[in-house]
């Protein structure tokens, strides 16, 4: 069977590689996408929680600073915040003198603080209220206990009035102690304010009048107004300029001066500015690590399991598709020896070629089995014929039907010779098949071998009316061969040629030189061989004419022996025939000049 090369795109290796790459790419892409998505979500959650903790810490400390004149006693608050948030918190002065620390060890501080804690200048990135001053810093604006009582009583009366009017406002108390009303419906609030006298709880109390006048004076000084009384600051810290100089004052400058004046008023009543350092529990120098939560780890594990399951399923599907032809081959190979099974070829890759080779092997096995059965039958027939004849003549002689004279002995001897010839031919074939055929190699002239063959078969050819010719062209032809075996090869060919050439025909023996080989040809003018019979010409017990017997057609082993002997000499034998014109058998042997290193004798 001719070996066929599998195209790369149909190769099993290429398909396995493509399948592996596809599974790997899908798994990597899915894993990467799920990991990125899950990690991004987890990071956002963790970052949001971290930012919320930072805002909480900063806001709590700002509230403490707004309600205390110093940082004395803040250590307990810092410790609680660190325990609640799991963060390392350190509070220092602007010169980095430690005020409070959540850790027992004095850890080194990073180059930049996390934020500045100052209620008069809050960090807008961390503060919930975007105002320039924390609203919890009230200082001198805080109402006295008596004023708070009066405000609450007025507010309770206003609430009763509002409820009778069908309004239910939300009462909000500011850090200074003042009360305010918030309505869901602004229109209803305006109507109720006039009826229920809501301005009473909102009015500045006596303790605030002096503070507001001081604030107005400070603001006028900041704005460089010649007449301080031209600016009025209300209890809600809104301002108004009425008089000379209002044209030169912008709203931005006026608001900045109001804020600066308030800071001057509030500074003695709040804690001094401080630096806040927030970091990981281990060390403030280390960045805060990302530790995924249990839910995040669960999602990652579930996603990885899903990707693994899909990859395994895809691999199993591809593997089953690839091994399906192999299972068919295994099932066919496991059939009983006497049953020959052909497997359909469904692919064009290596497995498809293996299947085709299996089918070819099964077909050749069937042919060999048929040939074996046929050969056994032929051998039995070839041996039975002479043995039957010998037995018949002996029984006849024993019964007195045939005289035991010289003629009977000659007949028995002929049958014994035929029987011996069949046995010798089978012995030669068995030795050649087993590689145990012994050859005595020597350098010889092919013309001498042809002379001996012609001499040996001349009488037989003359009795058949066939002419034997010999031609040697060119220079002396020499070869390394076993003279007896070579003579046997040519003799078998000549014997067949004479047997199949009618009277008046001719058999010609030639010796030719062709490049590095010697060609020995036996050409006859006989009946020829049909083209459909040529492939079986060298098969054992094959006869061109089935009607011929051993006595008229030979044993059917001569050409098989000739081919085996030619192969043992490193040569070959071929046949060419034209029906009705004759046949030519060509023995090709290496020339002696090409075999100078060969030993004088060898075994095949």
Image (cartoon, rainbow, N blue to C red):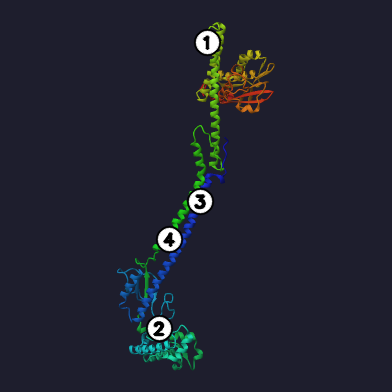
Q: Is residue 485 visible?
A: yes
Would residue 269 appear left or right of 408 to someone viewing this image? Answer: left
Identify whether 165 is placed above or below 394: below
- Percent x, y for residue 57? 37, 73
Mark 3 or mark 1, earlier in chain: 3
Residue placed under numbered mark 1 in the picture: 395
Local crowd size for mark 3, using a 10 Å CA cut-off: few (<14), some (14–19), many (≥20): few
Which element type, helix, strand or loop, lies under badge 4? helix
Residue placed under numbered mark 3 in the picture: 21
Marks 3 and 1, how far apart in space? 84 Å
Would residue 473 appear left or right of 129 to someone viewing this image? Answer: right
Residue placed under numbered mark 4 in the picture: 299
Local crowd size for mark 1, using a 10 Å CA cut-off: few (<14), some (14–19), many (≥20): few
Mark 4 or mark 1, earlier in chain: 4
Which element type, helix, strand or loop, lies under badge 3? helix
Which element type, helix, strand or loop, lies under badge 1? helix
Question: Which residue is at a point 57% across and 7% down the rendered structure image?
Answer: 407
**For the residues bearing labels 4 and 1, Cβ distance under 8 angstroms:** no
Give me the disc on residue 172: 2
Mark 2 or mark 3, earlier in chain: 3
Local crowd size for mark 4, using a 10 Å CA cut-off: few (<14), some (14–19), many (≥20): some
Front residue (pair 124, 246): 124
Of labels 4 and 1, the one closer to you: 1
Local crowd size for mark 2, using a 10 Å CA cut-off: few (<14), some (14–19), many (≥20): few
């Amino acid at each position: 069977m001719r070996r066929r090369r599998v195209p790369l795109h149909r190769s099993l290796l290429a398909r396995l590689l493509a399948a592996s790459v596809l599974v790997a790419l899908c798994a990597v892409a899915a894993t990467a996408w799920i990991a990125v998505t899950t990690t991004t979500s987890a990071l956002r959650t963790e970052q949001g929680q971290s930012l919320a903790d930072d805002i909480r810490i900063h806001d709590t400390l700002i509230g403490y600073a707004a309600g205390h004149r110093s940082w004395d006693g803040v250590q307990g608050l810092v410790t609680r915040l660190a325990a609640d948030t799991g963060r390392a918190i350190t509070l220092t002065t602007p010169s980095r003198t430690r005020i409070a620390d959540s850790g027992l060890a004095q850890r080194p501080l990073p180059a930049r603080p996390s934020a500045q804690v100052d209620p008069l200048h809050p960090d807008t990135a961390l503060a919930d209220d975007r105002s320039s001053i924390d609203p919890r810093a009230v200082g001198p604006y805080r109402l006295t206990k008596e004023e708070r009582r009066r405000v609450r009583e007025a507010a309770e009366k206003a609430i009763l009035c509002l409820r009778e009017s069908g309004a239910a406002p939300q009462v909000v108390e500011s850090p200074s102690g003042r009360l305010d009303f918030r309505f869901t419906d602004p229109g209803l609030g305006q109507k109720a304010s006039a009826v229920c006298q809501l301005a009473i709880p909102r009015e500045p109390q006596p303790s605030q009048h002096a503070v507001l006048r001081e604030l107005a004076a400070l603001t006028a000084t900041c704005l460089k107004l010649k007449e301080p009384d031209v600016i009025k600051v209300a209890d809600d810290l809104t301002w108004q300029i009425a008089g000379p100089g209002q044209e030169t004052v912008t709203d931005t400058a006026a608001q900045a001066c109001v804020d600066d004046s308030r800071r001057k008023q509030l500074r003695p009543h709040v804690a001094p500015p401080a630096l806040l350092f927030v970091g990981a529990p281990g060390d403030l120098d280390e960045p805060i690590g990302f530790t995924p939560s249990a839910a995040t780890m669960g999602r990652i594990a579930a996603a990885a399991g899903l990707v693994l399951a899909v990859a395994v399923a895809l691999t199993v599907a591809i593997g089953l598709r690839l091994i399906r032809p192999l299972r068919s081959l295994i099932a066919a190979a496991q059939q009983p020896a006497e049953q020959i099974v052909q497997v359909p070829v469904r692919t064009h890759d290596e497995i498809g070629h293996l299947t085709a080779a299996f089918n070819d092997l099964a077909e050749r096995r069937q042919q060999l089995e048929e040939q074996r059965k046929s050969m056994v039958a032929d051998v039995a027939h070839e041996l039975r014929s002479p043995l039957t004849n010998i037995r018949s003549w002996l029984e006849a002689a024993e019964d007195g039907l045939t005289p035991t004279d010289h003629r009977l002995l000659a007949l028995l001897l002929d049958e014994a010779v035929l029987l011996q010839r069949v046995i010798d031919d089978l012995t030669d074939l068995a030795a050649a098949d087993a590689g145990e055929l012994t050859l005595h190699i020597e350098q010889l002239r092919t013309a001498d071998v042809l002379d001996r063959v012609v001499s040996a078969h001349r009488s037989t050819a003359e009795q058949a009316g066939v002419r034997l010719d010999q031609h040697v062209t060119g220079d002396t032809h020499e070869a390394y061969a076993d003279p007896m075996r070579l003579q046997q090869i040519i003799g078998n060919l000549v014997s067949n040629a004479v047997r199949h050439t009618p009277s008046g025909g001719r058999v010609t023996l030639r010796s030719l030189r062709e490049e590095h080989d010697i060609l020995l040809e036996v050409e006859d003018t006989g009946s020829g061989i049909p083209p459909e019979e040529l492939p079986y010409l060298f098969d054992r017990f094959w006869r061109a004419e089935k009607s011929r017997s051993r006595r008229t057609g030979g044993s059917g082993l001569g050409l098989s022996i000739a081919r085996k002997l030619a192969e043992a000499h490193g040569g070959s034998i071929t046949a060419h025939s034209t029906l009705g014109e004759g046949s030519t058998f060509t023995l090709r042997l290496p020339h002696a000049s090409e075999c100078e290193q060969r030993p004088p004798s060898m075994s095949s």
